[in-house]
């Protein structure tokens, strides 16, 4: 059965800390819905109403474009081992870029990571838990290293060139403002 709460409890925080994958969903009223899987050591619970997500370079930058226009974001975790549970964090997000005053304290929450693009700062409005009894069981094997290796091989200037080529607008043509952030 689904339960709705307005904050992250200690039990929920503990659940989040054990998860190896989560999903991010955003949209505007005129865009496609973007739903992306995320992993690595890229999620932090700051308090019971705020979380941070380290947004690494990828083939698109839909989240930044959508948050600039709309602000709504949903993060979903699901238990693939142990007790079943699906957890959704509903909130309003904003992009923190390296030239923003909040950058130093936010990026300091994460290990240094090649290809770091932005940090997404989310104010939690609601939390929903549901049973997840239909979710299959999986065993975690290991993190993939390809994204980190790719970003390291590009170097900082190569990554910025990649952003110009692939990350300046969403697939629906919405500006991501990535170049303004650096």
Image (cartoon, helix red, strand yellow):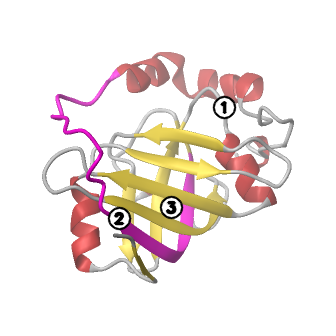
Q: Is residue 154 above or below residue 51?
A: above
Q: Which mark is residue 130?
A: 2
Numbered mark located on residue 60 in the image: 1
For label 3, the crowd category at 10 Å Cα-Cα, with few meaning under 14, some 14 to 19 and many 20 or more, is few
Label 1: few (<14), some (14–19) or many (≥20) C-alpha neighbours in 10 Å: some
Looking at the image, can residue 52 be seen?
Answer: yes
Magenta run includes residue 133: yes
Q: Position of residue 182 (x, y in %)?
A: 70, 45
Residue 181 appearing in the image: no
Residue 135 rendering spot, x and y as whole percentages: 29, 44
Q: Residues within 10 Å of mark 2 (few under 14, many from 20)?
A: some
Circle 3 residue: 104
Distance from Cα at disc 2 to Cα at disc 1: 30 Å
Residue segment shown in magenta: 118-145
Left or right: 162 with respect to 152?
right
Residue sitting at 75 percent across and 41 percent down? 32
Q: Secondary structure at mark 1?
A: loop
């Amino acid at each position: 059965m689904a339960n709705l709460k307005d904050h992250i409890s200690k039990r929920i925080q503990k659940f989040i800390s054990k998860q190896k994958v989560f999903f991010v969903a955003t949209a505007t009223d005129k865009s496609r819905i973007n739903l992306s899987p995320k992993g690595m050591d890229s999620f932090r619970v700051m308090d019971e109403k705020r979380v941070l997500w380290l947004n690494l370079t990828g083939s698109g930058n839909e989240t930044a474009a959508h948050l600039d226009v709309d602000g709504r974001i949903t993060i979903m975790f699901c238990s693939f081992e142990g007790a079943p549970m699906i957890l959704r964090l509903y909130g309003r997000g904003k992009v923190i870029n390296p030239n923003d005053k909040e950058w130093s304290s936010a990026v300091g929450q994460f290990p240094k990571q090649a290809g770091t693009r932005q940090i997404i700062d989310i104010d939690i409005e609601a939390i929903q838990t549901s049973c997840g009894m239909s979710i299959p069981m999986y065993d975690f094997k290991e993190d993939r290293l390809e994204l980190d290796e790719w970003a390291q091989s590009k170097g900082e200037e190569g990554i910025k060139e990649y952003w110009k080529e692939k990350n300046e607008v969403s697939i629906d043509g919405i500006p991501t403002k990535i170049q303004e952030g650096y």
